[in-house]
Image (cartoon, rainbow, N blue to C red):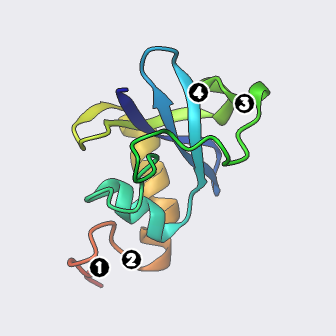
């Protein structure tokens, strides 16, 4: 089953990462965004594995039926395939959220690159 992983935002600080099943376009897994999770999403996505060891999508994650549409999770900031390819990005919203989550905290979204002051 093909998945895409999306960063969605309702407002500054109210961001979510969601895994979406391509065929049904339904959210199957969600994570509340924080600096560490967004760093992973923007870099290697190691911590964003919506599949169990058997390869089945996790369904016991609290995603209720009324929140299965990706649009219910907010505006799309960035979408990636489950193997990491960038599929779509809203540049203005992306840089606004980078400023909120990283620059305002003196951090960089790439863990090996410190912010220059």
Cα separation, mark 4 vs mark 3, equals 8 Å
Q: Nearer the viewer, residue 61 or 95?
A: 61
Which circle marks residue 86 in the picture? none
- The answer to the question of whether label 1 and label 3 lie on touching residues, with beta carbons closer than 8 A, is no
Cα separation, mark 1 vs mark 2, equals 6 Å
- The answer to the question of whether label 1 and label 2 lie on touching residues, with beta carbons closer than 8 A, is yes
Mark earlier in primary sequence (4, 2): 4
Mark earlier in primary sequence (1, 3): 3
Classify residue 73 by image quadrant. top right
Which circle marks residue 107 in the picture? 2
Which residue, given by chain and number where applicable, does mark 3 sit on?
67
Mark 4 packing: few (<14 Cα in 10 Å), some, or many (20+)? some
- Against 116, residue 32 (above or below) is above
Query: Residue 110 at x, y = what percent?
Result: 27, 68
Which residue, given by chain and number where applicable, does mark 1 sit on?
115
Query: Residue 87 at x, y = what percent?
Result: 28, 29
Cα separation, mark 4 vs mark 2, equals 28 Å
């Amino acid at each position: 089953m093909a998945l895409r992983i999306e960063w969605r935002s309702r407002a500054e600080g109210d961001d979510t990462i969601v895994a979406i099943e391509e065929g049904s376009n339904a959210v199957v897994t969600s994570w509340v965004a924080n600096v560490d999770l967004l760093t992973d999403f923007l870099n290697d996505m190691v911590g964003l594995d919506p599949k169990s060891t058997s390869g089945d999508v996790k369904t016991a994650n609290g995603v209720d039926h009324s929140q299965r549409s990706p649009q219910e999770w907010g505006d799309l900031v960035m979408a990636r395939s489950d193997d990491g390819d960038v599929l779509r990005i809203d540049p203005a919203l992306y840089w606004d959220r980078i400023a909120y989550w990283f620059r305002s905290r003196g951090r960089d979204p790439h863990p090996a690159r410190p912010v220059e002051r």
